[in-house]
Amino acid sequence: MATTLLHADVLKFATRERVSVAMELDDIDTLARNYRPRLLRFVMASVRDEDLADTIVQDALLKAYRNRAGFRGDCSLNTWLTGIAVNLIRDHARTQKFKFWKKAGASSVDASEMANHLRSSGSSPEGTLLAREQALQVHQAMEELSPNQRTVFLLRFIEEMELAEIAEVMDMPVNTVKTHLHRAVKSVRTRVGGQRV
Amino acid sequence: MTEHKQNPMDSSEHLSDELFCEMLVSQHRAPEETVELAEMKDALATYRTETMAWAERRSAAQPSLAAAARRQHLWSAAPQWAMAAVAIMSITVGVLHFTGVPGDETAMDEQTIPAAAVAQANPQQQIADDNALLESINSALNTGSTLPVDALGLSRAQNAGTRHHGSVE
């Protein structure tokens, strides 16, 4: 009896979730309101260019909206959207224009809005001066990672995704994800720790 | 790797990369946590908070995507409209061809119609010409032998043969 009730509750919850997701997907502005900031943070940390990040996020949301019938609910909407964004970043990374800007920006100090926001004193009570300085160091250390290492690091520690979700988003085995993650952590640890010492 | 698992922390309280990575994910503060790990956790938490604040502020300034979605929908439907137009054109041409609605033949008919019209322009003359033709045919038929066999003399020979057979009997 109790098991049947529990099963019914789970089904009811799943149905409610599905309806909620369908409503989010059917309204592009609701989709943007709920997911654009999170996507923008991830894409900006990946490409380090505000305009390009805006374009990629907009493309990802429009692509998701256009292909909403293809969302089967096997993963969360956030995972699905992040997967679309990861693919768009890969597509952009292949273009010469992106490579040119990347090369031009590599030699200079990261002066993006996001880096400046991290540099500034800010108003967040969580951000102590030391943590803020180290957050900026993490941001700079990620610049030196390979694209796969950076994506895995961001998804794991900034987007707080599980390894299985990252594997799905990046379309690679979990063990490969683990390898990229360990290498990324090692590199970031060395850079941030080195500056700390 | 195995060595790291057996001895995750060395004498100087330095965590192995693998353990560091695992402990970095966990939310709660473990008692064996090093200063380095705690600082890295704080740094990542600050990074998450501050970058999210930046992204929310920037997202709020972005325009609505509804218009872009409508535009994109129209553009994405363009190939379908083009294919539909081609299909309708093909069907129309096919139907017109097989139902006999004049195409190029119309031009040919238009060339013959004026000739007929010219012929019918003077009906009295046409009737007179036809009558003259019939007259000439009648006169030709009425002159000379009535049958072609008569002209060749075949009927006489046939009659003579009949008589010959009769005399034998």
Image: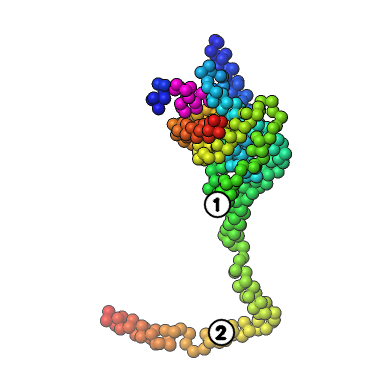
Residue at the farthest top position: A1
The residue depicted at 62 percent of the width and 24 percent of the height is A16
For residue B146, side relative to residue A32 (left or right): left
Task: Indicate how the structure is coloured in the image.
Answer: rainbow
Using the rendered view, name the quadrant where residue B118 is placed.
bottom right
Q: Residue furthest left?
A: B168
Query: Is B119 or B58 nearer to us in this picture?
Result: B58
- Label 2 CA crowd tier, 10 Å (few <14, some 14–19, many 20+): few
For badge 1, the amino acid type reads Gln
Residue A34 x, y percent position in the rendering: 66, 32
Q: Which residue carries the number 1 mark?
A: A96
Which x, y percent locates residue B7? 42, 21
Q: Chain of mark 2?
A: B
| Region rendered in magenta | B9-24
Please provide percent x and percent y for residue A173: 45, 33
In the rendered image, which residue does mark 2 sit on? B138
- Compared to residue A33, the image places residue B116 above or below, namely below
* Numbered disc 2: secondary structure: helix
Residue B136 figure quarter = bottom right
Task: Say if residue B149 shows up in the picture.
Answer: yes
x 53%, y 48%: residue: A94
Q: Is residue B19 left or right of residue A120?
A: left
Badge 1 marks a residue whose secondary structure is: helix
Residue type for callout 2: Asn
Q: Mark 1: few, some, or many residues within 10 Å (few <14, many ≥20)?
A: few
Q: In the figure, B28 relative to B54: above or below?
A: above
Q: Is residue B147 magenta?
A: no
Same chain for marks 1 and 2? no
Which quarter of the rendered picture does the C terminus of chain B lie within?
bottom left
